[in-house]
Amino acid sequence: MIEVEREPAVAAELFGGRIELARRFAEALGRHGEERGLIGPLEPPRLWSRHILNSAVIAPLFSGRVGDVGSGAGLPGLVLAIARPDVEWVLIEPMERRVAWLSEQVETLGLDNVEVVRARAEDWKHGPVLDAVTARAVSALRTLVPITAPLVRDGGELILLKGVNAENEIGAAEKQLRRLNVTNARVVVVGEGVLDEPSRVFRATVR
């Protein structure tokens, strides 16, 4: 029996009236995520604190129509769609088995604010139409910015979950940021005083 982390008390504060949907998603991912190749064997015991709340805490940063590139298990896209039903989410994922999982969860949870697109970000056909793009644990900024910025409208944002080396990644991606007219790049820490490990977010404007 896989032991899934007990729900931290702060989860109900972050999800409000949507907490039951978050619980159902956490239960499904904790029970089936490893066998379906979505998460590693060490993740269920820290699923809430390391993954779900890490994603949910950044929900207030978004508005409009937002893409999640490399959505995978639905982190952060499905979590954000649960937390922010007023935002339209486009989950962009190339792998068939992950697309199947995402589509199942959208249907099971009744998320009418989510579109699942099977594609690589590089193959996005719709041009710069999104108000923002997010991603989590996909790649370094010097690789991630060139595949995410072209999806964002003029004046829209990149809001990317990053790790402790985020500042260094900005320096390494200077050439790509300049070439793609990505401005006001900075790291924002979200969730201090709320989570034991707050989330680090790369934010920048696309021009």
Image (tube, rainbow, N blue to C red):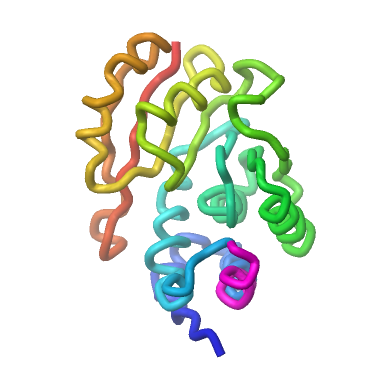
Reply above or below: 127 against 10. Answer: above
Along the viewing direction, whichever of 125 and 67 lies nearer the viewer: 125
Locate residue 162: give its quadrant.
top left
> In the rendered structure, which segment of residues is drawn in magenta?
28-37
Reply above or below: 196 against 148. Answer: below
Magenta span has 68?
A: no
Quarter placement of the C terminus: top left
Along the viewing direction, whichever of 22 and 150 lies nearer the viewer: 150
Quarter placement of the N terminus: bottom right
Number of numbered discs on residues: 0
Along the viewing direction, whichever of 190 and 41 lies nearer the viewer: 41
Q: Residue 90, percent across and down?
A: 66, 38
Q: Is residue 130 left or right of residue 62?
A: right
Locate residue 60: give its quadrant.
top left
- Which residue is drawn at the image coordinates 42% and 34% (left, top)? 159
Q: Residue 115, percent across and down?
A: 73, 41
Reply above or below: 50 against 203. Answer: below
- Which residue is drawn at the image coordinates 59% and 30% (left, top)? 121
Reply above or below: 125 against 133. Answer: above
Residue 89 visible in the shown view = no
Locate residue 11: give its quadrant.
bottom left
Residue 175 visible in the shown view = yes
Magenta span has 29?
A: yes
- Which residue is drawn at the image coordinates 64% and 48% (left, top)? 85
Q: Residue 122, percent across and down?
A: 59, 25
- Which residue is drawn at the image coordinates 30% and 14% (left, top)? 175
